[in-house]
Amino acid sequence: MPKVYENVGCPYCGCSCDDVRVTVSDDGKKVLEVENVCAIGTEIFKHGSSEHRHRLPRLRQPDGSMKEISYEEAIEWTAQHLYKAKKPLMYGFGSTNCEGQAAAARVMESAGGCLDNCATICHGPSFLAIFDNGYPTCTLGEVKNRADVIVYWGSNPAHAHPRHMSRYSIFPRGFFTGKGQKKRTVVVIDPRYTDTANVADIHVRVKQGHDYELFDAFRMVMHGHGDDLPDVVADVPKEQILQVAEIMANARFGTVFYGMGLTHSDGRNHNIDIAISLMRDLNKVAKWTIMAMRGHYNIAGPGVVWSWTFGFPYCLDLTKKNYAHMNPGETSSVDMAMRDETDMFINIGTDAGAHFPIPAVQHLKKHPWVTIDPSVCMASEISDLHIPVCICGVDTGGIVYRMDNVPIQFRQVLDPQGLLTDEELLNKIADRVDELNAQGA
Ligand code: SF4
């Protein structure tokens, strides 16, 4: 009899939807049906039972081909290279569970290397702003139950977080929001008329790269200087700025969801810190919160796990062994790669081959490169060693942190068929590095 799993978590975007229903074949090896999930999430579950998945590590041979080896050989190869490396870098972690992230911390503490996660190329600027200016945020449940004004600023959930609007922000009927979308005002601030802008009440077409000026203009209005605004700020007419400012000031509960439009454009962390300052202004007259649209389903996880382990969320330099050090710009993955400062790279739960700048990849490629990932991806195909592992939420469970830092227990639905989890693999590597350290001491 096929087995039906309820309340399954989707291991793709920061919505971390936990209402998925998955039907699995009676031998536990094939996903037959997936419900309550968007198109992206559906693909993840289907991919879980793909016949094309690798189930053994592959090591590059002198002729350039990849040859299957055992897990034991892969663990030995990785531990030996980590032991020899002076400044290895382990990077990724958006797509693994907190148990794997904790085991990775153990590996790099033993190896004396650097540990970084995808925030470094994503919401890292948000961390910098939060260090400077705080984080007046809330949970997605509070948005669902209370929010009557929603602002998506530089984010496009219709494409990047497909169920965000229906589960949390615009369409659901909550405790104090019984009329759902009808009683919510939705503002989208984006240079493009996106599919998210298409469902908004107001689209503010800001000039690309000029968000800071627009925040400044809103702050001027909140401080009583609206009359002094020029006729147009960042391509936005003064009348529209005053209109949106009035909606914000009259909100019962408002939330700004922001994304790469702010963290990847001119100003970066300063776009976020002025957004947080605007929240402070607004909270004098209304109730406002702000939330980063975190990308992967557990990219909030390493920030939490490593903060309680080392005191820092990302860009960790553990080479001093007894002291953790963090200084983005100095200890961030792309910066270190561009300066050719690392001598080994471990890509885990991400695809640096696809998403790092090509010059950074070219530098990293000069040294041993290991990819730990369930799938064939660009990183796995340029690696010296590819170690396949379980997909969190499909072949294994675990804790993940949603974009609002709410922890969720993900479930296993498929038989892992001999694959190790990230946690199991990394703990075996850490054990072996510890042995080598003890022998060398
Ligand atoms: S919105 Fe995100 S977490 Fe939810 S089903 Fe789609 S990809 Fe998965």
Image (cartoon, rainbow, N blue to C red):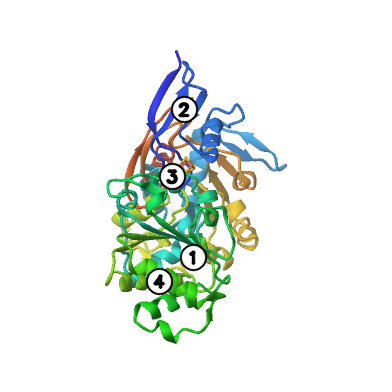
State whether residue 70 is above or below residue 364.
above
Residue, disc 2: 416
Q: Secondary structure at mark 4?
A: helix
What's the residue type where badge 2 is placed?
Answer: Pro
| Alpha-carbon span between mark 2 and mark 4 | 53 Å
Foreground pick, 359 / 108: 359
Residue at 54%, 55% in the rendered image: 344
Foreground pick, 88 / 302: 302
Residue, disc 4: 245
Residue 289: percent from the left, percent from the top?
A: 33, 62
Residue contact between numbered discs 1 and 3, judged by CB atoms under 8 Å:
no
Residue, disc 1: 263
What's the residue type where badge 1 is placed?
Answer: Thr
Label 1 within 8 A of ligand 1 by Cβ: no
Residue, disc 3: 166
Q: Secondary structure at mark 2?
A: loop
